[in-house]
Image (spheres, grey):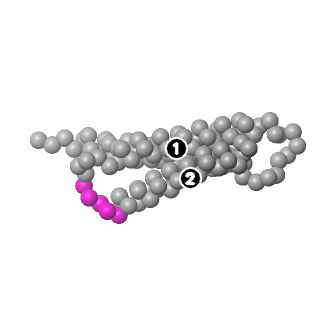
Amino acid sequence: MRNRGIGRGRMFMGGLLLLAAIINAGVSLMMSPHGDVVAKGTEHVKTTVVTFMRNGAIGTLILCGLSAWLLFPARRPKWPARDWAIIVVLALLAASSIYTLVWLQTAVLH
């Protein structure tokens, strides 16, 4: 007797969390304060934006980890194209989040 519902549920929740990670990274990217142009009187907003971006990057890393754990169980059907596509998306999201954390630490806060 097999219970395939658990596997399908893991894949669904993993895909949903991966979508949430993509949305979270996109929102943080749109809020990015790249550039040196600052309007007069808006310097006080810098710490709020930095905090938002830092929390967004950390949240993206957490969502990527959870979705990877759900999408790659020990026993799963082998679909190499889908697996590689998911791995590439997870790697891009994780790399961009780590870059954001490093960039915020070095360039913006100092």
Name the residue at 35% across, 64% down: 81
Name the residue at 63% across, 42% down: 53
Residue 72's spot in the image, x, y percent? 32, 49
**Residue designated by label 2:** 96
Decide which of 46, 11 is in the foreground and name it.
46
Say whether residue 30 is left or right of residue 81.
Answer: right
Whether residue 87 is situated above or below residue 109 in the rendered picture: below
**Residue designated by label 1:** 60
Amino acid type of the residue that numbered disc 1 sits on in the rendered structure = Thr
Considering every residue shown, the one lying at the far left of the view is: 1
Specify whether residue 58 is in view.
yes
Quadrant into which the N terminus falls: top left
The magenta-colored residue range is: 77-81
Question: Magenta stretch mostly in which secondary structure?
Answer: loop
Q: Quadrant of residue 14?
A: top left
Decide which of 41, 5 is in the foreground and name it.
41
- State if disc 1 and disc 2 touch (CB < 8 Å): yes
Residue 74's spot in the image, x, y percent? 25, 47
Amino acid type of the residue that numbered disc 2 sits on in the rendered structure = Ser
Say whether residue 49 is left or right of residue 65.
Answer: right
Earlier in the chain: of badge 2 and badge 1, it is 1
Residue 39's spot in the image, x, y percent? 85, 46
Residue 98 image label:
none
Q: Quadrant of residue 84?
A: bottom left
Q: Residues within 10 Å of mark 2 (few under 14, many from 20)?
A: some
Considering every residue shown, the one lying at the far right of the view is: 40
Q: Residues within 10 Å of mark 1 (few under 14, many from 20)?
A: many
Magenta-span inclusion, residue 92? no
Say whether residue 66 is left or right of residue 36.
Answer: left
Distance from Cα at disc 2 to Cα at disc 1: 9 Å
Mark 2, secondary structure of its residue: helix
Specify whether residue 16 is in view.
no
